[in-house]
Image (cartoon, grey):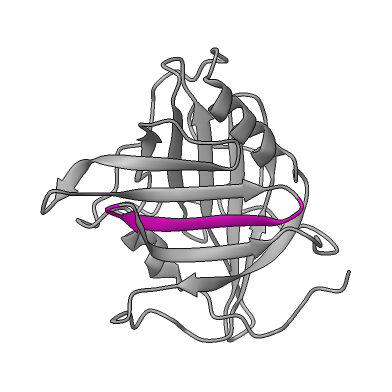
Amino acid sequence: MTRRLTPLFVLPLFFFAACGGDDGMPAEDPQATVMNAELPEDKRAWLANLREPCGQAFPGQLERAPETSTMLEGEELLVVYFDVCEEDEVRLPFHIEQMDGEWDRSRTWIFRPHDDGTIELRHDHRLPDGSEDEGSTWYGAFTVAEGTANQQEFIREELRDGVATGWRVIIEPGVRYVYGTIRDGEWNWRVDFDLSEPMDSPPPPAWGYEDGAGPPR
């Protein structure tokens, strides 16, 4: 298909740094050993669905944001690329075509299964030279409850005002991919990608991944 250039209201670069949690602090670069362990059925099925669109890229748009937010730029194009779909890691680079026509390729969502039966979500933030965006990277969380083949939630241990925060990720192959933050179980931010029609070709590698190197395992 021809890439759709319909105006899309998307999240600017600094929103995804804010998604590190209500305190805005990133997590340490994950170093735990990732295992091909026996995951619960819901998580095995969810990861299988997440790998289904591998090698394809899709456009998306913002569906929900706080009323007080001033972080929207307007008509940038938002793209998710199902890039790496291995047994022990799934990587989804996130790309924004900015209003001046330049591309921001600084963000990658990373999902890893662990030997304790959980799935980990991390956000790898890079600068244009490929180096880590110190202070704004590696935040994330683990699944802490049963999900479904289409939906998993990644909840932070930290609580603010006694309210749990985290991320909800929905994957329905051929239909939609949904990523967003949640607070007390309700959507705070939400971005939807249409998986019914892939773009003609995938985007270039995310910053820091040009040589095929990935983050530490």
Q: How many marks?
A: 0
Residue 38 appears left or right of 56:
left
**Place of residue 111 in the rendered image (x, y in percent of width and height, measured from the top left):** 52, 37
Rendered residue at 32%/62% (across/down)? 18
Front residue (pair 174, 36): 174
**Place of residue 171 in the rendered image (x, y in percent of width and height, measured from the top left):** 62, 47
Rendered residue at 77%/57% (across/down)? 202
Residue 90 appears left or right of 54:
left
**Residue 126 magenta-highlighted:** no
Task: Using the rendered image of the protein, determine whether residue 124 is visible from the camera's viewpoint.
Answer: no
Above or below, comparing residue 51 to residue 191 in the picture: above
Residue 215 appears left or right of 162:
right
Residue 10 appears left or right of 18:
right
Query: Predominant secondary structure in magenta?
Result: strand
**Place of residue 117 in the rendered image (x, y in percent of width and height, measured from the top left):** 45, 19
Above or below, comparing residue 167 to residue 39 in the picture: below
* Residue, far left: 161
Above or below, comparing residue 215 to residue 198 in the picture: above
Task: Using the rendered image of the protein, determine whether residue 206 is visible from the camera's viewpoint.
Answer: yes
Rendered residue at 59%/86% (across/down)? 100
Rendered residue at 75%/46% (across/down)? 53
Question: Range of the magenta residues?
Answer: 174-184
The quadrant of the image that shows the N terminus is bottom right
**Place of residue 141 in the rendered image (x, y in percent of width and height, measured from the top left):** 35, 39
Res. 204 image quadrant: bottom right
**Residue 182 magenta-highlighted:** yes
Front residue (pair 142, 82): 142
Res. 54 image quadrant: top right
